[in-house]
Image (tube, grey):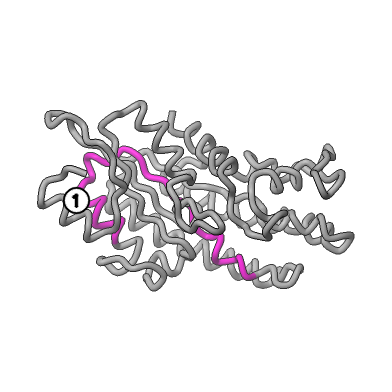
Amino acid sequence: MRMSRLLLAGALAVGALTAVPTAAHSDPVHYYVALGDSLSRGYLPGSGDTNQGYVDDLYVTLHQKDPTLQLVKLGCSGETTGTMINGGNCGYTAGSQLAAAEQFLAANRANVTYLTIDIGANDVDGCAPAGSIDAVCLVQGALTITQNLNTILSRLRAADGGLPRSVGMTYYDPFLQYWLTGLQGQLIATASVGLLTTINAAESLEYTAYGFTIADVFSAFDTAGFVPFTSVPGHGSVPANVATICRLTYMCDLQNIHANVAGYQVIAQTFAAKLN
């Protein structure tokens, strides 16, 4: 990426910028800043972080509208709301993903066009051990997410002045895969949707309070759609939402919560609909 020596130093201080062709020298440069966890990094089992995630797909769409746009991909696989604030999961010169974002946003406030974020899944990922769901763990996780997200969003808004078009994400429910394990799993899958609804509602309230719109990935993955039933190879007839989790994530094949390439495309489309 061609940048002035000063801007390059600032970029290295806050994290890696994705290399893209630059616009003509006379054109102003604009930025899309992407924050979050492994979904924002495009994590794929066996490959690790990739350039095939929703952020990358969304960037292609946004870049077609603005050829000066450059991607600043600051997310961190394994990030929780706590480590986003305090650091410890990925190496940032600024100390944490949030601090890195604050530095970049403050230095480039007038030129940051878009800001996206997904965070919170790793706060509750451990609440479904050995094919069960720990409701107390999920409730505590929701409280932690709410408290930390308030800190994250307030600091982002102070740094960016509310100038970027900003979108936060609701999550799909990977635990719907438990439906495939039998009657007990079906009870767990059903309960998980209600609990995730609570978590997504809490996150959405925080996002809205700070002027973010919501990319409703929960609905895009038909998470609450237990009917109609449809056929999934190797699993027979299952509810539509379970079939969607099998089709768009690695849960049914690898018991891995991450979206696949098709799933990331759906997430990107959901974000794009809020940025048109």
Quadrant assignment, res 177 = bottom right
> Label 1 sits on what residue type?
Ala
Query: Which residue sits furthest left?
Result: 5
**Residue 171 percent location from the top left of the image:** 59, 51
Q: Which residue is label 1 attached to?
A: 107
Q: Please state the extent of the stretch shown in magenta in the rendering.
A: 100-126
Quadrant into which the C terminus falls? top left
For mark 1, does the 10 Å Cα neighbourhood hold few (<14), some (14 to 19), or many (20 or more) residues? some
Q: On the picture, is 233 further left or further right than 248?
A: right
Tell me the residue at 53%/68% (across/down): 144
Query: Is 92 a magenta residue?
Result: no
Q: Secondary structure at mark 1?
A: helix
Question: In the rendered picture of this protein, how many numbered marks are placed on residues?
Answer: 1
Dominant secondary structure, magenta: helix
- Residue 142 in the image: above or below residue 60: below
**Horizontal placement of 273 versus 132: left or right?**
left
Depth order, front residue of 85/178: 178
- Where residue 225 sits: x, y (%)? 76, 42
Could you say where residue 223 lies in the image, as x and y percent from the top left?
70, 45
Going 71% across and 58% down the picture, which residue do you hit?
A: 175
Residue 96 is drawn in which quadrant? bottom left
Residue 123 counted in the magenta span: yes
- Seen from the viewer's position, the closer of residues 225 and 7 is 7
Horizontal arrangement in the rendering, residue 106 relative to residue 63 (left or right): left
Q: Which residue is drawn at the image coordinates 53% and 50% (left, top)?
A: 205
